[in-house]
Amino acid sequence: MIFERLKYRHELFFYGFLCIYAALGLYNLETLPVAWTDETMNLDPAIQYTKFHQYFSKLWPNSGAETVFASYPPLIQLWHILWLKFVQPTIFNVRLPFLIMHLTTFFLLYKILTQSLNKTISIFLIIIFAFDKSVFELSRSVRIEAIIMLLITLYFYLKSINTKQIYLGFIVGLMAISHLYAFPIVVVIVLKKILETSFKKSIPFIIAAIIPAFFSLYFIDFNIQQLISQLTVQTSKHTPQSTSFLSYLKASFIDRFWPYYKEMPLQYVIIIGMALLNFWQMLTSIKNPKVWFFQKFSAELFAFSFTLFFLITPQYRYLPVFLLLGILFIRDNALWIKFTSKKYSIYILGIIALNGFAIFSARHIVAIYQRPERISEPFLSFLASNIPQNKKTLILGESIGEYYAATRKNCDYGLDFHPQHFNYNDYEQVYYLTKYKMPLGQEIGCYMPNQNEIPEYIQKFAKGGTYYKTKLWKINSLQDYQKITAPYLKY
């Protein structure tokens, strides 16, 4: 019996780690973080479709979005629409599938890595990935990265077990409508498929890949003009704005990683190291580019690296997809294989894994300490008791307002810094949720839940915000409304 347990010790450790990660994720699902901007913006088109059976969003400032939403690739919104047919739009319900997707990515990644790496190395790589700041912060925060990472691992795992091409093509098609930055990965995968076989044999794969895009266009009544218009505007907001090439390089390769330097310094070395190793492999294969192109994940990682570092804004929230592709890339890299053959490699990987453990643990500990201030239901009850229910209402400000408005047809939620599609005169009452004292309007109430005192040595890790001392203000005049929103109307 003991020997049998030792035989499966790697599986026991991996699934034990997965269970602990899942338990913490479930307990802090709606509190780490509290409701935030990207979450509500991604959710809003689905909320409006659920309420009014029309696909639009006033929350997004781009012209035309208030009529038909085409400011973002539709996969995440289509997921929300499907999911909200079965559940109520609470923070826990909305985030739960994203946590499950994230855990499934770990499982599939383990299966892929152990096809060519020993299980100890595979587990260390997964822990390094799981504890990465950008990865665990985005795992439950309702961004598209969780879906993209699941699709990538699902595609390559199913490909490794010779799944039918039509299924693989459909997965690639879903990837294509996830985010614009995923498109270079899709192009590489499709090119590889065609070159590996032939265009004729690739037709079922290509047709399956086109189906999601066709359905997406059908969903917006093939309004190509709005799609181009809104995506062009949205893309322009997420492309580099540096005035010189040197300042751009600094922003992309230095400023992008600012949170890492003080919290996870080794992670910067890992990410840049993966990019340089990938670039070096391409340079050394210049005489035989076809061989390089077909090496596992080399071309996919290079395509995404170029997009990440040169085409999109320098924000670390895009790094999870890079780190996933980087881990898949180094799995079969000659230098990596040489490194892992050394006995000391285990100790180095252990140190790197611990590099993220402190931050991961601190974030969860703080969320547990601050749970009374972070759970949403008491705060939503506070709003319900202070806002008359029988009037057409607009709530501006803190993102939790979206969840209050979600189940009320006579209530809209708007971001105070995206007021373009909201008109004060369309509402009988307008409220503003804010942590700050207002120089205008009427304070209706201030949310004051019980507080748990956080030990000083943990206080510096207390990120993610709470609902404590969030004030509900009533805006009583058009003039006051204009003073609040005017600074943002040129956005």
Image (tube, rainbow, N blue to C red):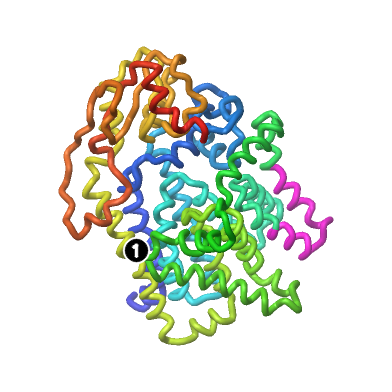
Total label count?
Answer: 1
Report the residue at 39% width, 28% height from top.
Answer: 484
Q: Looking at the image, which is closer to me, 135 or 101?
A: 135
Asked if one can make out residue 46 in the rendered structure from this viewpoint, the answer is: no
Report the residue at 49% width, 77% height from top.
Answer: 118
Q: Is residue 23 above or below residue 491?
A: below
Report the residue at 43% width, 82% height from top.
Answer: 345
Badge 1: residue crowd in 10 Å (few <14, some 14–19, many ≥20):
some
Q: Residue 199 colored magenta?
A: yes
Q: Looking at the image, which is closer to me, 45 or 377?
A: 45
Q: Position of residue 274 (x, y in %)?
A: 53, 71
Q: Could you say which quadrant of the image residue 444 lies in?
A: top left
Q: Residue 279 colored magenta?
A: no
Q: Amino acid at mark 1?
A: Glu
Numbered range of the magenta stretch: 188-211
Which residue extends farthest right?
Answer: 200
Label 1: which secondary element: helix
Q: Is residue 139 above or below residue 324?
A: above
Q: Quadrant of the N terminus?
A: bottom left
Report the residue at 78% width, 64% height from top.
Answer: 195
In the picture, measured across the screen, residue 405 lies left or right of residue 302, that is left
Asked if one can make out residue 187 in the rendered structure from this viewpoint, the answer is: yes
Q: Which residue is mark 1?
A: 263
Q: Position of residue 420 (x, y in %)?
A: 51, 27
- Magenta-colored segment: predominant secondary structure: helix
Q: Looking at the image, which is closer to me, 469 or 406?
A: 469
In the picture, measured across the screen, residue 473 lies left or right of residue 321, that is left
Which residue extends farthest front?
Answer: 243
Q: Position of residue 346 (x, y in %)?
A: 41, 80
In the picture, measured across the screen, residue 246 lies left or right of residue 343, that is right
Q: Position of residue 452 (x, y in %)?
A: 16, 46
